[in-house]
């Protein structure tokens, strides 16, 4: 009994000398977890910006995320990779920091993909492949709800995206028609990779000094295949505006309210026609309501340019003209300019273009798509089927449908100086690029090849177009594609090779 009494105080008051206090044991673990959270946060931020920083495609962003997480787990947390296949709540997501990380990753993936999809682009590029982000968001949510495994979820999303992208990816058509010389030029560009992400392509090459001035050919399309020409409509509108100036119907220095009284009392109404045709009026690319429609309709391949005259009037009146005097591409501004000239001529916009440009040049297969669709739906660059752009009030910005045969007639008239509104081609102010100036919607650029090219490209959700004029050499190239890629890439290469 005395021995027991003697042992109890020794046990209670004499802890082993080699065991640190509990607070000392916890400190290193807390610091380690904090360092891991900081490192992982940095990786998530880098991942979210990887599309911009590294130029990765959408699939690359997703796969990079899985690789970064695996590397973090092995190298920083020093755990076996197999642990990542355990439920997150039993591993790294047991605490609040891990749960926050899971939420951040599930949100960061589609956000980064949307940023990559809609970032960049100019001169009216409306290709929108953010449908991929929508697909990944659905797969991420569904997979994680079932598995509660982050890495497995990200890998499932990446594989799903890869399979769908592969299934939809466009392939170049096989059928070839038209001029053998042009087809040989296209084969040459195909070997260089300039026909990648194309399906049906129609091309016209014009050389007024050649024995055969116009040569037409196509792959999967021919010179009579109608396609949307997108923002090339602006260039056509610019010709008609310049012609209306010659007729004395409008003045370039007049405020737009002179012709559209519904804009009176608004800042937007004080913009002149010259500011509108040179994209220096300070208008946004398109109105707020149209932008909101685009946010959810474009990823689904649906037409979002459906504003009528009342809607576009409201969108225009809400413009604050921020940045007035500086070049900023605006489809809204071009639409207002076209509608203003139509009002001054007492014609609807489609009638204005038909009677002042299309019929005089014999462009019988060219029209403004404002009623029933004139073409079948095209596809985005990633292959998503999309609706044709049947427009209303925005028609002067992108509603024309044409063929390479008709556009060759236009290019020929522009090269020989017989087209209506030739003054539209003369550059009058600077753009946002040092080698380029703009006239009435027409851009004139000096290339490193020494060529001076007057041009305009176009793109809708499902089509692409390009018309480039080498006026000093009396040459032109036209490209139409049923995929919403950048038609100016192929067109520019053909112009360089024809110099």
Image (cartoon, grey):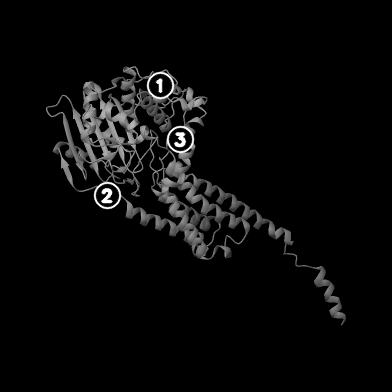
Q: Position of residue 415 (x, y in %)?
A: 23, 23
Closest to the observer, 405 or 121: 405
Which residue corresponds to mark 1? Answer: 274
Closest to the observer, 456 or 191: 456
The N terminus appears in which quarter of the rendering?
bottom right
Whether residue 78 sits left or right of residue 176 in the image: it is right
Mark 1 to mark 2 CA distance (whole Å): 42 Å
Q: Give the crowd class for mark 2: few <14, some 14-19, many >=20 residues within 10 Å.
A: few
Q: Position of residue 302 (x, y in %)?
A: 39, 47
In the rendered structure, which disc, 1 or 2, sits on the residue that comes first in sequence?
2
Whether residue 388 sits left or right of residue 315 in the image: it is left
Q: Which label belongs to residue 171? A: 2
Nearer to us of marks 3 and 1 is 3
Mark 2 to mark 3 CA distance (whole Å): 42 Å
Identify the residue at image location x=47%, y=28%. 262
**Pointer 2 with pointer 3, Cβ within 8 A:** no
In the rendered structure, which disc, 3 or 1, sits on the residue that comes first in sequence?
1
Q: Which label belongs to residue 310? A: 3
Whether residue 160 appears in this view of the structure is: yes
Closest to the observer, 69 or 16: 69
Q: Which secondary structure, mark 1?
A: helix
Closest to the observer, 19 or 383: 383
């Amino acid at each position: 009994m005395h021995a027991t009494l003697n042992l109890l105080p020794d046990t209670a008051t004499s802890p082993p000398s080699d065991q640190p206090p509990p607070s000392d044991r916890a400190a290193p673990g807390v610091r380690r977890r904090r360092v891991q959270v900081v490192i992982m946060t940095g990786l998530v931020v880098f991942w979210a910006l990887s599309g911009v920083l590294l130029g990765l495609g959408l699939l690359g962003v997703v796969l990079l995320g899985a690789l970064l997480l695996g590397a973090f787990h092995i190298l920083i947390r020093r755990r076996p990779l197999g642990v990542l296949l355990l439920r997150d709540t039993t591993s790294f997501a047991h605490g609040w920091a891990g749960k926050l990380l899971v939420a951040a990753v599930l949100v960061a993936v589609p956000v980064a993909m949307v940023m990559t999809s809609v970032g960049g682009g100019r001169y009216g590029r409306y290709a929108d492949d953010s449908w991929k982000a929508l697909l990944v968001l659905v797969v991420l949510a569904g997979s994680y709800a079932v598995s509660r495994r982050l890495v497995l979820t990200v890998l499932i999303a990446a594989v799903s995206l890869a399979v769908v992208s592969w299934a939809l990816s466009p392939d170049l058509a096989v059928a070839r028609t038209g001029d053998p010389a042009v087809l040989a030029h296209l084969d040459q560009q195909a070997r260089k990779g300039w026909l990648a992400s194309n399906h049906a392509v129609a091309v016209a090459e014009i050389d007024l000094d050649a024995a055969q001035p116009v040569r037409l050919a196509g792959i999967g399309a021919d010179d009579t295949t109608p396609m949307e020409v997108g923002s090339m409509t602006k260039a056509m509108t610019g010709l008609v505006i310049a012609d209306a100036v010659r007729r004395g119907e409008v003045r370039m220095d007049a405020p737009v309210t002179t012709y559209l009284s519904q804009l009176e009392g608004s800042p937007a109404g004080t913009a002149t026609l010259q500011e509108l045709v040179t994209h220096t009026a300070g208008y946004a690319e398109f109105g707020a309501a149209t932008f909101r429609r685009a946010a959810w309709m474009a990823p689904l391949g649906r037409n979002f340019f459906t504003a009528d005259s009342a809607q576009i009037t409201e969108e225009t009146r809400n413009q604050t003209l921020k940045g007035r005097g500086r070049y900023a591409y605006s489809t809204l501004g071009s639409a207002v300019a076209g509608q203003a000239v139509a009002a001054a001529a007492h014609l609807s916009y489609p009638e204005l273009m038909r009677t002042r440009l299309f019929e005089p040049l014999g462009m019988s297969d060219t029209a403004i798509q404002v009623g029933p669709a004139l073409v079948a739906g095209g596809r985005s660059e990633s292959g998503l089927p999309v609706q044709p752009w049947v427009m209303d009030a925005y028609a002067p910005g992108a509603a024309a449908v044409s063929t390479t045969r008709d556009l060759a007639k236009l290019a020929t008239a522009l090269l020989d100086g017989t087209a209506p509104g030739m003054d539209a081609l003369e550059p009058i102010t600077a753009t946002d690029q040092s080698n380029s100036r703009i006239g009435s919607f027409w851009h004139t650029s000096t290339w490193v090849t020494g060529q001076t090219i007057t041009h305009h490209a176009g793109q809708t959700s499902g089509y692409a177009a390009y018309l480039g004029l080498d006026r000093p050499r009396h040459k032109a190239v036209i490209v139409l594609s049923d995929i919403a890629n950048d038609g100016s890439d192929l067109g520019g290469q053909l112009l360089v090779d024809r110099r």
